[in-house]
Image (tube, rainbow, N blue to C red):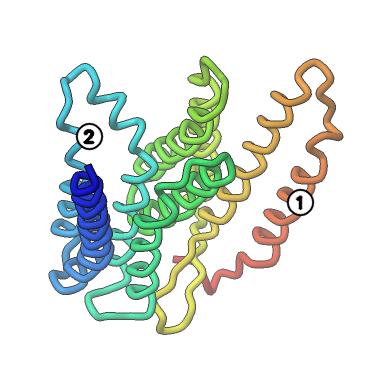
Amino acid sequence: MADYVLARKSRNIASGIVHVFLNLLLGVGSVLITVLSGSPILGLLLVLISKWRIFAVRSRYLWLNLKSNLVDLIVGISVVLLTYYAGTSFLIVDFILMAFYCAWLLFIKPLSSEAATLAQSLIAVFLGVSAATIMTANTNSVALVLLTFLIGYAASRHVLVQSNDKDFTLTTLVCGLVFSEVAWLCHTWAIIYTFGSTGIRIPQLSIILTIFAFVYNYARQAMIKYQDDFRFKHIIGPVIFGVVLIAIIVLAFSNPIFNI
């Protein structure tokens, strides 16, 4: 019996080491191969291969699996795309993305608390909208509208699926619709903040939608908590904070020097 327990522990330790190694390989490899190849194709393939379990199910479960893994896919795909659009030479942003993706895979993604779930969705919004904005900067606004709808839908669903709500389809669709409308309004005047030669580029839209996602989730939680006794005063603090912060960003940090 003791030998069995020892062997089981040894296998658990070995599998844990392999798990960490494979995640580090994905985090480093997806960025490294994108920079070296000068193309996002191999990096995206690496991310998709790592999610093979999504497709290893019966066809009737495929869509459900995709929806359940959308946030993780958005983060992985966004890391690769942001790396690609930063250029084909190694910059500070590449190492930041590499370190972050490893941290996401090892520490952030496995968490399941309410706060962690919200953090995961906000990260997906920030990175996803950043990649979508940069990728569609010189294309028709339809592409950005569709991508932001998907990101908003995925982020909202990721939070709501952990709650006690039995039917949250309407809520997720509304969130996606608001995302796409804001993206459509911002597309004609896309502001991207750059930071010297670091390669770091942060679209204004990604900041605005991340703030909106936080306030939106806070308001939803307050409505559930207070139900029939809900009053605007229950959410006035975060709403005012969000509105003021977005107003400052739009009015004070929309200098044409950042316009792409």
Residue at image coords 54%, 41%:
113
Q: Nearer the viewer, residue 85 or 190?
A: 85
Q: Amino acid at mark 2?
A: Ile
Q: Secondary structure at mark 2?
A: helix
Residue 17: percent from left, percent from top: 24, 60
Q: Is residue 42 visible?
A: yes
- Residue 101 falls in image quadrant: bottom left
Residue at image coords 27%, 24%:
63
Which residue ends up furthest to the bottom in the rendered image?
A: 197
Dot in front, 1 or 2 = 2
- Tell me the tag on residue 220: none
Q: Amino acid at mark 1?
A: Phe
Q: Nearer the viewer, residue 155 or 203?
A: 155
> How far, Cα to Cα, is label 1 from label 2?
39 Å
Classify residue 214 as left or right of residue 58: right
Question: For mark 1, does the 10 Å Cα neighbourhood hold few (<14), some (14 to 19), or many (20 or more) residues?
Answer: few
Q: Nearer the viewer, residue 82 or 156?
A: 156
Q: Earlier in the sequence, mark 1 or mark 2?
A: 2
User: Could you tell me which quadrant the C terminus lies in?
Assistant: bottom left
How many labels sit on residues? 2
Q: Which residue is mark 1?
A: 241
Q: Is residue 138 visible?
A: no
Q: Which residue is mark 2?
A: 54
- Residue 247 falls in image quadrant: bottom right
Residue 102: percent from left, percent from top: 34, 63
Residue 43: percent from left, percent from top: 19, 59
Above or below 79: residue 256: below
Which residue ends up furthest to the front in the rendered image?
A: 1
Classify residue 209 as left or right of residue 9: right
Residue at image coords 56%, 27%:
163
Residue 5: percent from left, percent from top: 25, 46
